[in-house]
Structure formats: structure tokens, C-alpha cells
Image (cartoon, rainbow, N blue to C red):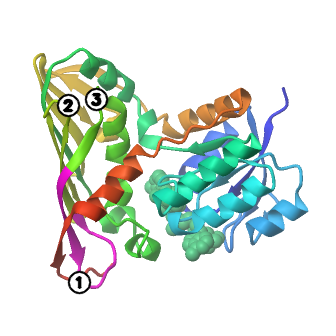
Amino acid sequence: MSPIKLAIVGVGKIVRDQHLPAIAANPDFELIATASRHGTVEGIPAFISIEAMLEAVPDIQAVSLCMPPQYRYQAALSALEAGKHVFLEKPPGASLSEVEDLIRLAASKGLSLFASWHSRHAPAVEAARAFLADAKIASVEIIWKEDVRQWHPNQEWIWQAGGLGVFDPGINALSIMTRILPRPAFLTAAELTFPDNRDAPIAASLSFRDRTGMPVTAEFDWRQTGKQSWDIRAETDQGLMVLSDGGARLTVADSIHVCGKDEEYPGLYRRFAEIIAEGTSDADLSPLTHVADAFMLGRRRITEAFHD
Ligand code: NAP
């Protein structure tokens, strides 16, 4: 079968770091165009807007939307209206209702919409899910602490409304949590800490429980220097499970079960090809729902101003 003719919109950090190598290694896709105000990819026809690109290159069959979330809905709408399958970077949008609108539109047109969650494709996530399915879980603790200056230098959009602040990495933890827990959890309390000069939080403490009362806590903090932490720990009847390094490594009672290499974006593009072939969509909004709940239920604290 000939490859799916793909275009990328919003050529920035994640496109260069992850999308381009994953697409180049996947024979199911051929990159034939990009749309970005400044960014280009060598050797690929470039346009400054998605509308100009869709008009000039009618052969495009699918688009990957990799701009900040506040600008994703309009681009997705243009793509779906032009009959293209759509890959949404995470988070899939700036609000739940706009993504729900895209889900309805894609279904009405028979197109595939993919709300991607790259952390779910980390190598130890499925093993953690399988382990927890058979364990009796007493409690779960999520610790996601990183240095924003290292990972998001000068990204203004991330501090603006809809940019999610510390929930930009935190939603990766929530995408794993919603995949590996045997029963859905729901938020019961939250505290969000906002720098005095920003519209998005720099830290968040979250408490969840599930219907059995099992507690889950999450600590997100962007002020971590030194060792970075992307860990999920579960106390179980079979010992302490630690899913660390953002889902790459799994230990149970100190013995290593999985320690794999980064396959997140290759996994995402395999899944995108699969849903296009099946004629289905994959758009689980549960990680974004937890973020929305945190903004709805959370208490707010103001802390000192943040400057890059
Ligand atoms: P980025 O480099 O700041 O943004 C990507 C590109 O989007 C920019 O280079 C810019 O290209 C375009 N863009 C920026 N502001 C825009 C605006 N106002 N309107 C239209 N386009 C705009 O960000 P990124 O780190 O690649 O992240 C992009 C998305 O990927 C985010 O949703 C993020 O959560 C997700 N993601 C990032 C990472 C990571 O490690 N960085 C990891 C996984 C997922 P032009 O100026 O050329 O238009």
C-alpha cells in the first residue's frame, strides 16, 4: 500500500526532536508539506499557514498539528473540513468542549482523529498496567518535578491561559495514570500555585480517589533543579511498584521488570496509521478532564514572579 501523505503544522521543538525521526522511520507515512510561520524542514515544501498549504497541496491525506494547544482547534477544523485525518499533539486542545467538537466533526466525515498521549507509549507503561490489574493497591503517589528553565526555555505560550503551565508535563503523568489504574480515579482536592506574573501554574498538588476509596496523590513542580523526577509509585500487596523515568523503567519490590528505550513517537505514528486503516478515531480525553477538574476544584496560591 502506498504511504499516507502527511503534512506537519507548527514546526518547532517537538517536531524536530521527535516527529521527524519517527515519520522518517515509518514506511506508512510520507511527509510532503509543512505549514509554519517560521519553521521549515529541509527539502519539504513549506507554507506559512495551514489554509495556504491545504489549498496548494490537495494530495495531503493527514496532518499532524504540533503548535501550542491554544491554536490547535482552528487548524484541526480547517484540516477536517478539507477531508484530512488529524493527529493532535498533547494536550489535544485548550478546552474539553472544543476537542469534543472535533470528535463529532471527524465522526460525521468518516475521518480519523487521534488525540495522542506520547507518554502512554513509554516502554514500561503496559507492564505497569498488567501488574496493577492483578495487584491489590493500597495507594498511588505521582511525583513529576522538573526544571522549567531546562525543558521549556522562553516558551511564552506555556505560561499563557490555555498553555497549562506545569500541567503541560503533568498531563503526561495523568495520561499514564489513566492508562494503568484498574479503575478510574476522580479528583477530590487540588492546590495550584501561580507565579505573580503568570496566567498558568508553576506547581500543583492533586488528590484523587477511586470508587473503592483508593487514594492517589500527584505533585507537579517546575522549580526542581538537580535530579528530575517523573515517577509513579504504588504500594501494593506484592510490594512497592515504581514506574520511573517517565514510564521507561518498572521495578516491583526492587527487582527490575522492564527497562526499555524511548519508543514513544514511533509508537504514536504506528497507532495513527492503525486507526486510519481501521477507519476509527482514538481520542481519550480523560487526562485533560483531570486538568480541567483541577482548574475547577483547585484552591489557588500566588507565589513569587517567574522570569526565564
Ligand atoms: P514550540 O517549539 O514552542 O512550538 C511549536 C511551533 O508552533 C513553534 O515553533 C511555532 O512555529 C508554532 N507556534 C508557536 N506559537 C504559535 C502561535 N501563536 N500560533 C501558531 N503557531 C505557533 O513548542 P513545542 O515544545 O514543540 O510544543 C508544541 C506542542 O507539543 C505542545 O502542545 C507541547 O505540549 C507538545 N509537546 C512538547 C514536547 C517537548 O518536549 N517540547 C514534548 C511532547 C509534546 P512557527 O513560529 O514557525 O509558526
- Image coords of residue 167 (percent x, y): 33, 59
Mark closest to the chain's N terminus, 3 or 2:
3
Q: Between marks 1 and 2, how big is the CA–CA gap?
A: 35 Å
**Rendered image: mark on residue 196:** 1
Q: Residues within 10 Å of mark 1 (few under 14, many from 20)?
A: some
Residue drawn at 74 percent across, 62 percent down: 78
- At mark 2, the secondary structure is strand
| Position of residue 129 in the picture relative to residue 53 (left or right) | left
For residue 239, which quarter of the picture?
A: top left
Three-letter code for the amino acid on which mark 2 is drawn: Val
- At mark 3, the secondary structure is loop
Q: Quadrant of ligand 1?
A: bottom right
Residue position marked by numbered label 3 in the rendering? 183
Q: Between marks 1 and 3, how big is the CA–CA gap?
A: 37 Å
For residue 160, which quarter of the picture?
A: bottom left
Q: Where are the magenta residues, as a range?
A: 188-203
30 in relation to 225, above or below:
above
Camera-nearest residue between 207 and 240: 207
Q: Is residue 264 magenta?
A: no
| Position of residue 245 in the picture relative to residue 105 (left or right) | left
Residue position marked by numbered label 2 in the rendering? 242
Three-letter code for the amino acid on which mark 3 is drawn: Arg
Q: Quadrant of the N terminus?
A: top right
